[in-house]
Image (cartoon, helix red, strand yellow):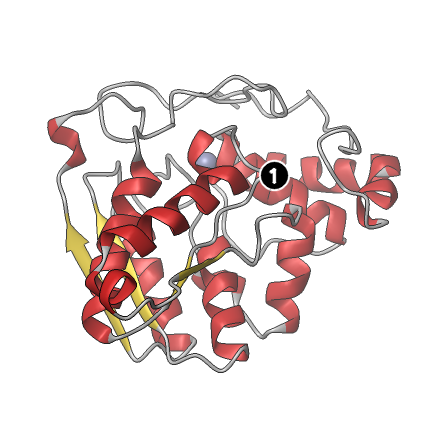
Amino acid sequence: MDSATTLAVARRQGFDTYALSFDYGQRHRFELKAARRVAAALGAVRHLVLRIDLRAFGGSALTDDIDVPRNRALDTSEIPVTYVPARNTIFLSFALGWAEVLGSSDLFIGVNALDYSGYPDCRPEYIQAFERLARLATRVGVEEGRELRIHTPLIQLTKAQIIRLGTDLGVDFSLTHTCYDPDRRGRACGLCDACRLRLRGFAECGLEDPLPYRREAAVRSQETEIRREGSGAGKRDSGNAGRDGRASYPSRLPSPDS
Ligand SMILES: [Zn+2]
């Protein structure tokens, strides 16, 4: 969802887009399929899927035999086990290499520092540091003094704002995939952090998530419930959204067995 919206932003700003996805040993293939659909739908000039086996290291619920947490408290500062060690640094390094070959000075990444899971490599200071590194690390940066820029159009947006922005830019969210732990048919679980942040975003927008969920009825009723309870949503939408202005999110989420 975030990557799709970021791609749409880059296109709207007039960039020819070269999309890069990673087959890094994540738990499932559905997000790569979704990435192909999204890149095609949004007119990427090329879409590459690079293979890097981060399972060789493990150390994350996404790349190791560790369960994906369900119904975890969101909005804590704790870094969850779904954190993949140094993932964005690895991804951005590959993107930087490709950008230099393409002669591009502009990298886009859909990191988000508000409605995220507490990952350290999603923060603005991290991105700024990588931007400095990019200028020092490349031939075009050193010889030509080219100002490489890392664009993070979503970094200060809430999930709800990202969904609105994507919708305005014509992103078809039914093509996207968010869940860390889908079933064999690719249906989202509705319970992992990624699903819950996504569902909360749709609920705050008053929109229905077009994706199928494994526990359809439970997830839909939860969505309605959030909308009804949405007293915090107005606060978040007033332009002062942040961790403190967070809408309350019901703890009565469907249990893994429901
Ligand atoms: Zn999920």
Of the pair 70 and 15, the residue shown nearer to us = 15
Residue 30, relative to residue 153: is it above or below?
above
What residue lies at 38% left-to-right and 45% top-to-bottom?
Answer: 130
> Measured from the top left, where is residue 63 in percent x and y?
24, 30
What residue lies at 31% left-to-right and 24% top-to-bottom?
Answer: 61
Residue 80 occupies quadrant = top left
Mark 1: which secondary structure?
A: loop
- Three-letter amino acid code of the residue under disc 1: Asp
Residue 104, relative to residue 254: is it above or below?
below
Of the pair 136 and 123, the residue shown nearer to us = 136
Residue 158 is left or right of residue 15, and the answer is: right
Residue 26 occupies quadrant = top left
Residue 63, relative to residue 44: is it above or below?
above
Residue 236 occupies quadrant = top right
Q: Mark 1 — residue?
A: 115
> Measured from the top left, where is residue 178 in percent x and y?
45, 46
What residue lies at 60% left-to-right and 19% top-to-bottom?
Answer: 76
**Is the CB of the residue bearing disc 1 within 8 angstroms of ligand 1?**
no
Residue 116 is left or right of residue 132, and the answer is: right
Residue 171 is left or right of residue 243, and the answer is: left
Mark 1 Cα shell of 10 Å, populated few (<14), some (14-19), many (≥20):
many
> Measured from the top left, where is residue 13 in percent x and y?
53, 77
Q: How many numbered dots are placed on residues in this image?
A: 1
Residue 245 is left or right of residue 119, and the answer is: right
What residue lies at 33% left-to-right and 19% top-to-bottom?
Answer: 67
Q: Is residue 199 visible?
A: yes
Q: Is residue 215 visible?
A: no
> Measured from the top left, where is residue 24 in percent x and y?
20, 42
